[in-house]
Image (cartoon, coloured by chain):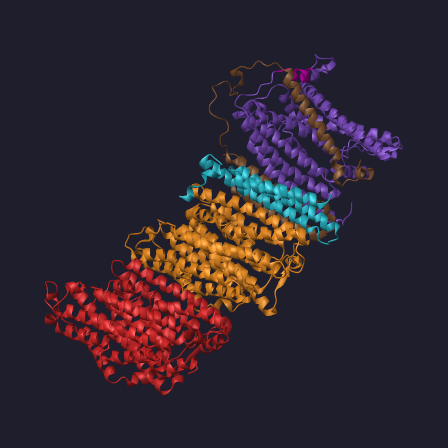
Amino acid sequence: MFLSSALLAATNTPFSYFPIVLQLGAAVGFVALTMLATHFLGPKRKTSDKLINFESGIEQKGNARQPVAIKYFLTAILFVLFDVEVIFFYPYAVNFRGLGWEGFWAMLMFVGAFLAGFIYIIRKGALKWED
Amino acid sequence: MNALLSTAISGLVLMFVGLFVKNRQSIKYFAIAALLVAFVANLFDVAWIIHHKQGYTAYEHMITVSLFTTVFNAVILGSTLVYYLLSGSEFEKVGENVAEYFALQFFILAGIMLATSFSNLLILFLAIEIMSIPQYILAGSDKHNLKSNEASLKYFLMGSFSTGILLMGIVLIYGGSGSFDLEHLGIGAMALSPLTLVGILLMVFAMSFKVSAAPFHFWTPDVYDGSPTVFTAFMATVVKAGGFVAFIRLFQIAFKGGIVSPQWELVLEVITAATLIIGNITAVYQQSVKRMLSYSSIAQAGFMLFALLSFNMRAEQGILLYAAAYSLATIGAFSVLLKMNDYTFDGFNGLARKEPLLAFGMTICLFSLAGIPLTAGFFAKYFVLAAAVQQGGMLWLVIIAIVCAAISVYYYFKVIIAMYFKAGDPEVATPSNAYKTMLVITVALVILLGIFPNLLLKWL
Amino acid sequence: MPVQYYIFLSVALFCIGVMGVLMRRNAIIIFMCVELMLNAVNLLMVAFSKMWADAGHADAGAAQIFVFFIMVVAAAEVAVGLAIIVMMYRNTHSVDINLLNRLKN
Amino acid sequence: MMQISFDLVYLLDKVLLIVGVLALSLLVAMYSTWGERKVAGWIQDRYGPNRAGPLGILQPLADGGKLFFKEEIIPANSNRFLFILGPSLAMLVACMTSAVIPWGDVLEVGGRQISLQVADVNIGVLYIFAVVSLGVYGVMLGGWGSNNKFSLLAALRGASQIISYELAMGLSLISLVMLTGSLSIKDIVEQQRHGLWNIVYQPLGFLIFLICSFAECTRTPFDLTEADSELNGGYHLEYSSMKLGFYLFAEYINMFISSALMASLYFGGYSFPGMDSLGLSVNATTVLGFLALFIKIIAFLFFFMWVRWTLPRFRYDQLMRLGWNMLIPLALFNMLITGGLILWQGHGH
Amino acid sequence: MLTVLLILIPLLAGVITFGLKGAGPKILALLSSIATLGVALVALFQFRANPAATHVSAQWIPQLKANFEVGLDGMAAMLCLLTALAFVLVFVSIFSREYERSASFYGLMLLSQAGLTGVFVAADAMLFYVFWELALIPVYFLCSMWGGERRIPVTFKFFVYTFIGSLFMLVGIIYLYLHAGSFGYQDFIKGAAGLSASDQNWLFWLFFVAFAIKMPIFPLHTWQPDTYEQSPTPVTMILSGVMVKMGLFGVLRWLLPVLPHAAAGWADLVMILSIIGIVYASCIAIVQSDLKRMIAYSSIAHIGLMSAAIFAHNETSLQGVMVQMFNHGINIIGLWIIVDVIEQRLGIRNMKELGGIASKAPKIAIFLVVIALANVALPLTNGFIGEFLMFSGVFQVNVWFMAVAGLGIILSAVYMLNMIQRVIFGESNAVTSNVTDLTAGETFSLTLIVLLIVYLGVYPKPLLELVQGSSQAVLAAFGR
């Protein structure tokens, strides 16, 4: 085996993720097992009425997969952008004592840009859900 | 660098201006003012460099500003100024977000400023992306027009694809050399690792994509044709010139000389020849002037590639002049096109009788594109060809270029023939006096540069 | 692990991406393939960074910074690209790029 | 040979720990459902479950068993694969988050130190974010796969809500990271063990994090994804049997993990005041620590429930406005203040 | 300074003309052309007195070492005079006519005059090239806008031919420039001398193609008859009277002295081509029934002879060419004026439908006969001396060349006399009986031309003296 204890004890080698892989295996096993179990355990008396989608008891109309409000896409897009900006803060946060005031001012500029974009989208009404 | 900061901040400010100012006319004036500020800021840089007789580096050697950089920036900003003055009013016909359009263009300008001064591959990547991403948006800004949507999507997919290739090139070069810094790449001196070689090739391809050189040009006509015309004018001129400078900077500084040059020079020569031939021949068959101009922009790219192949002072002068001449002329031609209702050649029939000034302006611009003497385009072509002849070993390419220049006369003159020699009643928007004045100034600039290219070159 | 493994892996990923872009017809899938290409580059970037750091290069960290920038730019591209695809979808109810040949005529 | 056996022991440790943690999660989740109903009963002045076993203690088992034996219905119009994948993913994600939470300090068995943390990775906080953000797929796939209008709408709402609050959550944690200088949760807990709890330094950050946790778990008052009155049950409208169970369980497990996380990040985790001055053995301290953590978790769980039966549901626009227009700027502000103060105090802590 | 004025007057007048209305353009054009003629005459005398005084040099593009350098020598002075004279003749003879969009018409005419003059005076290759194109573009527009029915494709062909030619020349110029270090004429000669024989050989063709297209020389002549036919006649006069001289001038100024060895090496080939052209064009001219086309082909034949004489490169032939450049210009303009008159009056130019003009319009008849005879180089007309010199020059090189070229003279007599007979004499028909005689302006122009024909025919010495220096300068390059 190549898993020496020194490696396993360290927190910054690929091997420190090994237990996570183990846990993933366990979780997948659990989920799959349960899914199979419920599949075989439950009764199966399917009728076509039972298999149509629920629409509060009225006839089903059309397909559910229609274009939805653009707001949701907008939220997704904004999330992608801002999340990446947030991710940028993390390395800074970890090292920020070392970077001192200089780093702080630099980050302040970054926050400024972040806020500029933020204020812009708010003013632009990208986050208005009332209408 | 001043101009870089100035354009970037102006772009941000413009976004906010759009929130508070509803009068589109004043947004335009604001943009023009911001551009002037950037221009002046750039002049300070020029003055600084001339005074100290040397360039400078900034941001931890991320960018290097030289005289060429700043003069080129001046050309870019100047062309944009002309573009705003000529076509700035057309923005509001595309959609309601006028301020955003201006802001996006300012970001593109900031990208170009980076592209002219990068000295690190990271900045190259950023510059190219900052130039490209706003263009995807501008291409699709006519939201309800399917063609515009399509142009945008196509541009986006192709653009991001080429970005991927560019990045792979960068990372392979990094793998081979251990640095992103152009001057520390040292590829010329080092033994060539296969990583580096593949990297350079990938970068050639990616950059060819960006400047729409054949055979990576196929997206160009569709994108240029589909985009709102007023933005096509911008992407086909200023942005393209910016891309070229990045291309040239990259290959002249990083990959020049040593054992590596022959590896990519042949590839580039073939690309150049293909670009010239395909661009010109296909342009001949176009029925729409807008599409013809798109193909012609490919053809012109072929000429600009000459500057890339020949590393000498003349090539620098050539690309500078070419960028100015080509941008001015194309911007002028597009501004006339914008007044037209029908973009086909037949749509121009009889324009000379109805709007003699428009026809005259268009003619001079087309002359310049075709490289007829006494217009700026002539000396532009002259300089790049002379650079190639001086470099030597590329005479076959020069001959191809000459033949292609002759072919180009055919399709450019088709417009002139339609305007002057054919009868018709074209549908054309009545140009305002301000526009007419500006067109005359543009034409005057084209001719002035055609007679005294020195006005521009003396700065180098 | 030798750096070659990483090179092989990311070149393979990259090629899968390229082939996907060239062969698939669905705009979203093409787009995902592009992202795959970018991430292949990211992977290689980090691998090379480690390689040069082991070789004693002073600024080997630059590649890791580069990865951050690629991520940001990719995010920006995602934002713009999604917007474009949504816009397209709303007008045509399709994301098949074979429909994109109106301009040819 | 020594080497291998040694490592096999390590492996055994980990496997046992993982099984333990998973079992604990499930158990807590199960009994949370019971607890919830009890709390509801208490707050609303009624009994709550009291038939199965004393105090209805066997009720969760009965519920769970029932779900296994219900018919599994997959609507004909749905996308079968996605339909099954949705709840599986939700459950999987819920099970994965616990991997980086330190459940206690080390145990000493046979001269070996066994950490009560499955994996002490140096990016623990980021790991949590990465895994939690996968949770949105469970919601989205379920809603989309069902091909039901209510489900889809609920899923979209849910996804928007989760990703929106993730931003604020991420931002609020940055100030914490600035304070601790580490992303490892174990480190963060250890720092609190030797100093004051982070809640003292980061009250605002904690508040934001707390609110976001509610939103992330789609708990009332942010449970718009399943708003019964308008969406007939939300994204899992079409689900039945254990697949529905998974969604419900996942929610409670998330609640449990959120509580554990909040306890670890802001309330000292397994540490408690005076922990090191008791003079007990390592193992005893660890067990006590674990109990302390568990008490904190229970307290948070109770808080979750308390809120549920107290506050009304937000309107969707209010929800989004709170997330974007309030929490994000607040978190940024908190971050700047924290950074400024720390630097002003001259790198002190 | 006078040399600059020669270019500047038409240039400025041309630009101003675009903005004028009504009769303004016409008048301004005439005045400016007369003024230019005056300046040309003064410049001629200045050149006779002090050649160096005609040189003007100013910095233009220092990066390229391209200067605005102009100056006169005998040949240039003569050709400037011809240009100035030609425009006066044209403007006078069409003065009574109304052109649609006359501002553009006269403006473009004047611009092309500036370009033509510039070509003749330029002593800097870049400048030469620029003027070369400047002369072309206005003519292109003139032909395309005011020409005949097929004008658009025909003129475009003309334009593309010449443009391609000049692009080749441009490559040549670039190449030479890189070796010479500047665009100056003298530097070019020096720079080219250092080139290898093979370089000189292909450079020769780069230049020669451009000039040959302009002249035109067989087989590059195909644009010419169509263009002459379709162009408005005033433009045809300029084209055939002056513009073809650009090609000849180019060879004499920029090809022979710069690349003498290559020129000597290729001389035989060029002469053969030229002579084929003579015979070919003459034969076709005989069978033409369209007046314009016939004259166009006759022009090809004449130019062929001149080109052959140039490449004979001995003093006799060169002097003959230079003199003939002037005389041919005068004669052919005269011919065109008359053709134009006939076409304007009768609306036809098919010789089969013409006839009997002499009885109705004696003045036309007289002028036509005199000019036609000058064109076939009858002794005592101006055409004679040039052709005589050229023949003797060619004879010195190769007697067979001369013999075949001599055939051209005979053939030209055939078609010219044929034309006179068909147009002037014979029965008048329904159309030709309506012919009216010349207007005052036309009479003036034609009288002037006839006077020159006779004067230079009887007393060619001033012309010969004028070009002597130029021909010697060319010969000097060959070491003779």
In this view, D278 is above or below A33: below
Q: Quadrant of residue D288?
A: top right
Using the image as rendered, state which of residue E450 and residue D139 is in the foreground. E450
Q: Colour of chain E?
A: red
Question: Where in the figure is residue B343, as x and y percent of width and height?
Answer: 37, 50
Furthest-bottom residue in this view: E49
Kindly report the secondary structure that dominates the magenta region of the rendered protein.
helix
Which of the image's four quarters has the C terminus of chain B? bottom right
Residue at the image position 46 percent from the left and 56 percent from the top:
B276
Name the colour assigned to chain B in the rendering: orange
Residue projecting furthest to the front: E400
Q: Nearer the viewer, residue E50 or D197?
A: E50
Q: Position of residue E83 (x, y in %)?
A: 30, 75
Report the side of B287 relative to D96 (left or right): left
Which chain did the renderer colour cyan? C
Q: Which range of residues does the magenta coloring cover?
A: D62-70
Quarter of the image for the N terminus of chain B: give it. Answer: bottom right
**Residue D340, above or below E250:** above
Query: Toward which corner of the image does residue D34 lie, by quadrant?
Result: top right
**What is chain A's hue in the picture?**
brown
Q: Nearer the viewer, residue B267 or A117?
A: B267
Indicate whether B110 appears above or below E207.
above
What is the number of callouts on the image?
0
Does residue D69 show up magenta in the picture? Answer: yes
Q: Is residue B16 magenta?
A: no
Give chain D's shade.
purple
Across and down, in percent, residue B154 comes to 49, 44
The residue located at (75%, 25%) in the rendering is D24
Name the spot of residue B208 as percent of width and height, x first. Answer: 53, 52
Specify whether residue D25 is in view.
yes
Q: Is residue B245 left or right of residue E130?
A: right
Is residue E30 visible in this depiction of the protein? Answer: no
